[in-house]
Image (tube, rainbow, N blue to C red):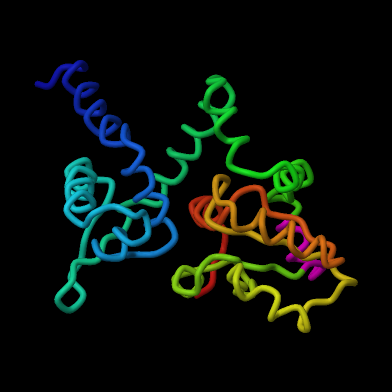
Amino acid sequence: MASQQEVLDSLAKVAKSLGNGHRLAIIERLAQADLSVDGLAKAIDLPIANVSQHLQNLRRAGLVKASRAGKQMVYQLSDERIVLVTNLLRQIAESNVAEIEKLVRGLFTDYEAETQLDAVSREELLEGLKNRQITLLDVRPRHEYESGHLPKAINAPLNEVEDLLKHLSKEIEIVAYCRGPYCTLSHKAVAKLTRLGYHIRRYDEGFPEWKASGLPVEQ
């Protein structure tokens, strides 16, 4: 029979696989869309060999899986709950580690950080969608949007958002979202459109957290 310590040691091996910032970056990108090794290497700016090693580590821990698409292996998260685990890790660290809190503040300009104070919660967003009181902008790259997005969201990558202005009303609130709490894209979209006179706020989470919570998504 196995001992309790053996079980805990096995759990520790899984936890250890998360103890690397590049692996967390891989998990963040796979939470948006399935990707090949090449695609991940470009997304997180690492050599292909390094990405491959990290993926093998995550595979051994049961956190990612792979399937063949033509000549390439495409990777995806093995379980949506992995996003919930990393999100809980983020919340605990931000609440209890002063260095993390300081680093997070440094991700955004002072103006962008102000948008966080008036962010839209999940409950507010659900209510706004139900009552059709908001226009929802997904400011992630197109391939991530096409892999899955919030209901009725319009894809508006940051470099294209101004081209969509003729379709956006200044009379209705706009909510922007992106990859998650550390993604700067929605902050930048809010800053840009606010300066242009639009009533816009950002969703305080992102697509992965929404999907991992079992809420509806579209493709």
Q: Is 33 covered by the magenta stretch?
A: no
Q: Nearer the viewer, residue 192 or 179?
A: 192
Front residue of 12 and 111: 111
Point out residue 118 in the picture as x, y percentages from the top left corner. Answer: 79, 46
Give the extent of the magenta segment. Answer: 125-134
- On-image quarter of the N terminus: top left
How far across and how far down the image is residue 24, in percent?
Answer: 37, 43
* Outermost residue, right side: 171
- Count of numbered marks: 0
Does 193 appear above or below 6? below
Left or right position of 215 against 69: right
Q: What is the residue that sits farthest to the left in this orientation?
A: 1
Residue at x-position 62% and y-position 73%: 156
Q: Residue at x 53, y 20 (%)?
A: 97
Residue at image position (31%, 43%) is 23
User: Measured along the vertical axis of the image, is residue 195 above or below residue 96?
Assistant: below
Quarter of the view holding residue 3:
top left
Image quadrant in which you'd find residue 20: top left
The residue depicted at 60 percent of the width and 37 percent of the height is: 106
Image height check: is 13 above or below 39? above
Taking the magenta stretch, the answer to whether it contains residue 131 is yes
Instruction: Return the residue nearer the eye: 46 or 198.
Output: 46
- Rendered location of residue 186, percent (x, y): 64, 57
**Left or right of residue 153: residue 169:** right
**Horizontal and vertical percent position of residue 72:** 18, 71
Q: Looking at the magenta stretch, what is its main secondary structure? A: helix
